[in-house]
Structures are given as structure tokens and as C-alpha cells.
Image (tube, helix red, strand yellow):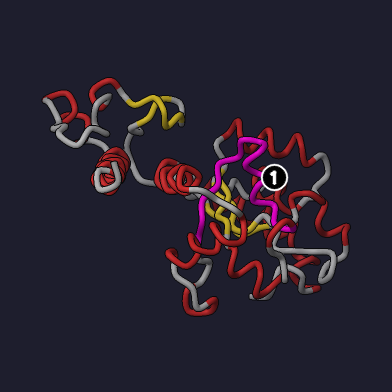
Amino acid sequence: MAPEDHPLSRMNFDGQMRMIDFLWHRLGKPNMSLHAGELTPSISPVETMRDRIRKTIDLGHAKRIGHGVDIAWEDDSEDLMAQMKRQGIAVEICLTSNYSILGVSKEQHPLHLYRSHGVPVFLNTDDEGVSRSTLTLEYIRGVREQGLGYLDLKEMSRASIEFSFLKGPSLYNGHDYRHLKSAFSSCRNGSWTPGAEARKALASSEKMRMELKLERAFASFEARFP
């Protein structure tokens, strides 16, 4: 193993993606989450930064990308972000790690670039033991450094489950958190209890159960601040 900017990593990247592609097909096309784009011009040749995220998606079949810091240096980055939005490929945003390893923070970070293009994003610790961070501290950094508000944090929290690999259908229609499945249309009300249709849906969907738990937690928290 080596950093993404290491000469061996740069030299062997295409071969590694072909290996992942081979194994992905042989192992039944499992869900993939891969780090990509943990690069900046201060540590990497620009040529290396032109296709790392795209190839990790197209050849490595990643449905989630860790870091994705060098998105602005990708060839036709606008088209790539449109593809990520269309295919629901999420980015695990690692603010503390990106600052401590790459020196990237504040307006240099592509968090708002991704969001402005509709790419799903959520906050991530990367490695708690190395970064000495927790998810709570990442949320604090998101507020202080990136200017995120409460509604932004809610959206990211929802995205962290919506674009997870939990089994079963979603609580939401078309990844739109404003539109709940009909059986759950009132689940954000404090007095709501699941009816027969909702209980049946929950029994067969781990993802829906986790998303409902989050929505109920939001409702309970927000009831304290009418």
C-alpha cells in the first residue's frame, strides 16, 4: 500500500483498476467503495489527476468515492459530475483528513463544487485513529470551515444512509428527501405511528428502517426547539 501520489501508485493505477474490474465481474458485481482523487498539484503531477476519479468509477465500478479532492483537475469534470449525479455516485467528504494530509480546507475544498452540481455528499472521518477525529468533530468543522447550516447537515445525514449499501428500498422517492413513500408521509410528525403498510415495508428493508430512525430522531430533536 502507498499514498495515491506515490510513484508506484501512479505507475500501477490502470493495472489495479483492471484487476478490480476482473474481480468485480467474477464476484458477482458487488457494491464498491474506493478512495480516489486524494491528490493536489503540490504533491502530484497534473497528468495523474486527469482521470483518477473517472477511471475509479468506470473501471473500478465504485458507487462511493472517498475524498475526490482533485475533481476540478479531471478531464471534462462537468460531465463527470453530471454522471455522478445521474448514477447516484456519492462522495465521502473527509474534511479533517484532507486538511491534515493535503493541506486543503475552506474555499479550496471541492465540497461546495460537488453540491452545486447535485452530486450526493456526506461527511466522513476517513480514519478516526489517524485523523484523531470523530463524526461529530467533522460536523463541527463543516459548520465552522465550510459554512454549513442545519439543513445542510440534515441533507448530508440523510445521504449517508440513502447512498449506503444497506439492503432494501428507500424511504424516499427518487433520492428526494422531500418526498416520502406514501405509507410514511406523516412520519416526521411527533405523534406518528406506523400503519400496516408501513410495518410491512419496514420488515423487508434495512435501509428504510435506518432512514425512518433518522427521521424520527430529527422530529424528536426539533420538537425541543419549536
Which image quadrant is residue 103 in? bottom right
Q: Quadrant of the N terminus?
A: bottom right
**Three-letter residue code for mark 1:** Leu
Question: Which residue is under mark 1?
Answer: 113
Task: Give the residues drawn in magenta, as a range.
Answer: 108-124
Whether residue 68 is visible, yes or no, is yes
Q: Which quadrant of the rendered structure holds the C terminus?
A: top left
Residue 118 on image: x %, y %: 61, 35
Q: Say left or right for 200 vs 12.
A: left
Nearest the viewer among 220 and 126 is: 220
| Frontmost residue, 142 versus 75 | 142
Please tell me whether residue 19 is drawn above or below residue 62 in the rendered image.
below
In the rendered image, residue 4, in percent from the top left (x then y), is placed at 71, 68
Q: Is residue 114 magenta?
A: yes
Is residue 139 placed above or below 173 in the rendered structure?
A: below
**Residue 206 in view here:** no
Q: Residue at x 88, y 57 (%)?
A: 47
- Label 1 crowd (10 A; few <14 / some 14-19 / many >=20): some
Residue at the (55%, 36%) spot, across then down: 88
